[in-house]
Image (cartoon, rainbow, N blue to C red):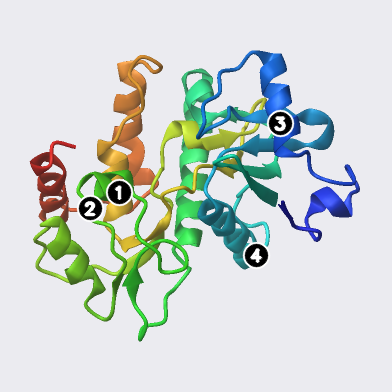
Amino acid sequence: MRALPNSSFFRERRANALPSPAEIRAINQQSGKEEDFYRSPPVEIRSMGLFVSNVTIIEAETQIMLRERFQGRLPVPEVFGWAEDGGQTFAYMALIEGEALMARWGSLDDNEKQAILKELHFLIKLLRTLKQDTHDQYIDILGKKPLNDLLTISARVTGPFCGLDAVQQFQDACGIEIAHQAPIVFTLNALLPPNIMISAGPNPKVTALLDWTQAGWYPAYWEYCKASRISVNPNNFPVTFMDERHSRLDMILERVEEADYNPWLYFLLSRGI
């Protein structure tokens, strides 16, 4: 067990220790949730303000880094610690109050939607203030480790790609032909309605950006291209919801022109992704 004694969980003395993996599994068994060897269903322990989920250690470290860098300005769940046990990783983090944007969007009025989109635009712009050393450029996840993007893994493109020509190395590996040099920016890489939490009640605010599993350093066009193409399960959301999300994406991210988007789309389709 790796616990973070300076986290609010211990500062506020919510408990003497984080629940063990065995205790989390027992809660799951009592709830009747299915479990497999690699992944245990997430657990909420509201009395401790605790959410326990299976994420990679790199994802937990990414959240810790972002909270330290932005000091509360970027709504990222606080990590209290993690444990590896029986082939599973248990991440202990703050329980976020609110609802997923996907669940609220249909009931929001236009002013509330506009406010949420503007807030998301500000948060992504804030994330973009993270900068690499101009003499140490790279495309990778935290710690210069291979990429964890579902699209690049499917295409067997993992990296990391380092050096002043890192973008060109990455694009060559993907088969993406773009004439100009795109800047490298820190990318959430999962900007989807299920990963955006907003507060309950009228005039909601963004309370958390979730799922930093695939986050890392990518060419600037990557976030927009992926968010405009990748959809959530159509069985869970009406088509009109997804159509509206795509039409308003320009309010959150800087629009990517066809000269960049078409080569990216070719990369995606040529590999049957």
Q: Which of pointers 4 and 2 lies earlier in the amino acid sequence?
A: 4
Q: Residue furthest bottom?
A: 135
Q: Secondary structure beneath disc 1?
A: helix
Q: Is residue 78 visible?
A: no
When the figure is inspected, residue 179 is found, relative to residue 203, above or below; the finding is below
**Residues at marks 1 and 3 touching, judged by CB atoms closer than 8 Å:** no
Seen as rendered, the residue at the extreme front is: 86
Mark 4 sits on what residue? 68
Q: Secondary structure at mark 3?
A: helix
Q: Position of residue 38 (x, y in %)?
A: 50, 35
Q: What residue is disc 2 on?
A: 256
- The residue at which mark 1 appears reads as 224
Question: Mark 3 sits on what residue?
Answer: 24
Mark 1: give few (<14), some (14-19) or many (20+) Cα within 10 Å.
Answer: many
Tags 4 and 2 in contact by the CB under 8 Å rule? no
Q: Is residue 273 positioned above or below 105 on the image?
A: below
Q: CA distance from mark 3 to mark 4?
A: 28 Å
Q: Amino acid at mark 2?
A: Val
Mark 2 and mark 1 lie on one chain; the one further toward the N terminus is: 1
Q: Nearer the viewer, mark 3 or mark 4?
A: 3
